[in-house]
């Protein structure tokens, strides 16, 4: 498996309706200012605040 070569900033909403996501994931931009090695692996990064 190859390592990632791009970092993308995404916008997500966790709202669900009867177990189905209510809103799609949206790509905000590609982050050419951030190397992939600086991004935590999924599930291993900081937990965002609720609100």
Image (spheres, helix red, strand yellow):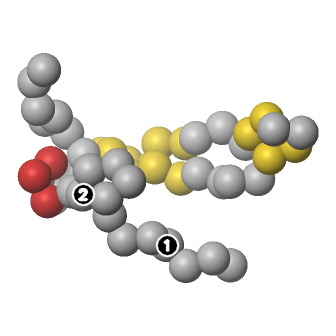
Name the side, left or right, on which 14 lies relative to 36.
right
Element at badge 2? Answer: loop
Which residue position holds label 1?
48
Image quadrant holding the N terminus, namely: top left
**Distance of label 1 from label 2 (alpha carbons):** 13 Å
Q: Quarter of the image holding residue 17?
A: top right
**Image disc number at residue 32:** none
Which residue occupies the foreground of this view, 36 or 41? 41
Image coordinates of residue 40 in percent, x first then y, are 24, 57
The residue at 74%/39% (across/down) is: 21
Element at badge 1? Answer: loop
- Taking 34 as reference, is 7 above or below it? above
Farthest residue to the top: give it. 1
Name the side, left or right, on which 23 lies relative to 41.
right
Image coordinates of residue 29 in percent, x first then y, are 37, 48
How crowded pointer 2 is (Cα within 10 Å; few <14, some 14-19, many 20+) is rated as: few
The residue at 31%/59% (across/down) is: 44
The residue at 36%/71% (across/down) is: 46
Image coordinates of residue 12 in percent, x first then y, are 58, 51
Name the side, left or right, on which 21 lies relative to 4.
right
- Taking 43 as reference, is 17 above or below it? above
Which residue position holds label 2?
40
Q: Quarter of the image holding residue 45?
A: bottom left
Marks 1,2: beta carbons within 8 A: no
């Amino acid at each position: 498996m190859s390592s990632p070569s791009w970092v993308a900033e995404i916008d997500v909403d966790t709202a669900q309706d009867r177990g189905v996501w209510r809103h799609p994931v949206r790509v905000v931009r590609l982050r050419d200012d951030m190397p992939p090695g600086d991004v935590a692996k999924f599930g291993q990064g900081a937990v965002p605040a609720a609100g």
